[in-house]
Image (tube, coloured by chain):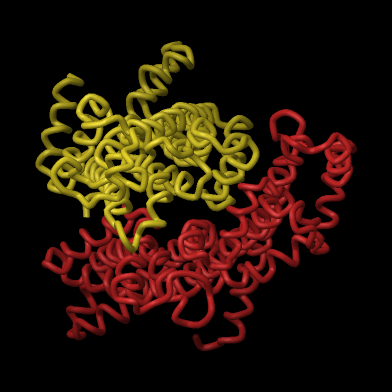
Amino acid sequence: MTDAPRSLSVLWRVMLPYLARRAAALGLVLLAVSVIIFAMLRLIPGDPAAVLAGVDARPEEVERLRGLLGLDQPAHVQYLRFIGRAVTGDLGRSLRSHEPVAHEIASRFRASLLLAATSLVLALAVGLPAGVFAAVRRGSAWDTALAAVSVLGVSMPTFWLGLLLIGFFSVRLDWLPTSGFDGPEYVVLPALTLAAFSLATIARTTRSCMLDVLGHEYVRTARAKGLGELAVTAKHALKNAVVPLVAVVGLQFGYLLGSSVVTESVFTWPGLGLLLVDAIKHRDLPVIQGAVLLISASFALINLIVDMLYAALDPRIRLS
Amino acid sequence: MSATRRDGTVVRLLRHRAGAAGLFVVTVFLAVVAVGPSIAPRPPTQANFRAILKAPGPGHWFGTDELGRDVLSRVVHGARLSIGMVVAAVAAAVGVGGGLGIWAGYRGGLHEAVVMRAIDVLLAMPGFLVALVIVTVLGIGTFNLILAVAVYSVPTFARVAHASALALRGTDFVQAARAYGARDGRVLARHVVPNMVSPLLVQASLRMATALLLASSLSFLGLGVQPPAPEWGAMLANGRSYLSTSPHVVLFPGLCIMLATLGFNLLGDGLRDVLDPRQVT
């Protein structure tokens, strides 16, 4: 504290090798994921080109597709080309629209990101205070109610919740639009639907993290020296409970990106998930590969950011 | 000895409010799975064009759908399909994931490194995507859906079994059995596996909940069980077109998914509290 620049440089000396290790691990994982995504094409049972072309395709169409997908070349050659193109942003062309995949998924990804981020903010804004309050008032009616609501939250099928919300707020009350994305009011129902699971998880985790911290001696010390309950909760307890929470919140963001597929389908939200389901139904493989790659890469990146935050907040992690 | 211990668990579970509620709900659903077709008033796909989209009432307690099929009969028949699929998938995942995890944790070394890195790769993708990738490759269908849900659940069980095996490997009774000259297979079967039943059971119950949500989601999206099979998620997908006029078509299958999921979640939470006193909050 006396010599801030010096301690900061020490921090970096410890942090950099840690981050380098994490980034290297991330690179390896992404490499493995890229192999899986590439292998998808070749793992299709039977003749992939014939399957993707459809049952009523002419033989010359199948051959054209075989050449287009590189199925007439050895797997390793094709993989290197796939990776080489992917790192420059070339993900091939859609088999249906013949548009570049990168172009098709870019705008869809923005919509998905907007939905996931709104849901996360919503889940945090409600889940965090609810969890803290339940822990502080442990055993109260509020605590019991939160436990009941949060177990309901993690048991709710996303698509059913979405349909119920549409039925009530759009059909019955006619307050909010049912589908599409044409203004801020279109975000409300999808974000609520998507946030439910994360909200419940964050509230539950916050409660248990807070209970864990509240049992520590430094909290008792803080109380003993006469600090008010608010100061104890906010300054001493919450600050320490935040560390394990960071990991959970990071995981939730990844979960939101992955599971937005269902919510997007219910509300016809023009995101990556809707595109992905459509592409799977029509076996438009390049689009599927591009979308899966993009979501997996974002998931990995979020995990790396969580690791960095974690290490910055808790010295025990970067030193071990 | 094991009988008294098991009795103890059930009795303690019954005293655990949430756990007992979960056990009750799960038992009811499993009973419907077992006897379902014989208690359903009508065949699940019997259409009746004179009773289309009728509201719930006498004769059709859950109403009828757009083809005049009895929703109650479809929901009851659907239990066997919806829950049966998930039981099969989770059982397969416990077998494969648990086996891999035990093997990795017990043997250590290269075996452990290879298995656990492969599990890490599966976990590096959001779970939902793993299932979607499998459906993409193998095609849409009931069996492929079960396979997708199973693969999606393998990492969970591999991790739990791995952690338990790792902890058990160092215990005195395992070391003693090995020193005594017992072969790996015997040590695993007699000393390691019986001691990780609790954590696997807790995980299996919680996973049933997640897997049920995943399987019904995929069917809802049209990537799993196909109509006219009365799978709950697929029924919702059909019913959504009639949401404004006949909400009961959407209400009952969704309610079933939610209640069954809730039951498995409560049972899992209860089992965890009862079997592992350290984690009681």
Give the camera-side residue of B225 and A36.
Answer: B225
Q: Does B175 sit above or below residue B108?
A: above
Numbered marks: total: 0
At which x and y percent is residue B50?
Answer: 29, 43
Identify the residue at horizontal 43%, vertical 75% (top origin).
A177
As drawn, is B280 to the left or to the right of B151? left
Kindly tell me whether residue B46 is visible in this rendering: yes
Q: Does A237 sit above or below residue A94?
A: below
As drawn, is B279 to the left or to the right of B1? right
Q: Colour of chain B?
A: yellow
At which x and y percent is residue A43?
Answer: 71, 34
Identify the residue at horizontal 39%, vertical 23% (top origin).
B174
Kindly tell me whether residue B269 is visible in this rendering: no
Q: Quadrant of residue A52?
A: top right
Chain (red): A
As drawn, is A41 to the left or to the right of B227? right
Identify the residue at horizontal 33%, vertical 24% (top origin).
B194
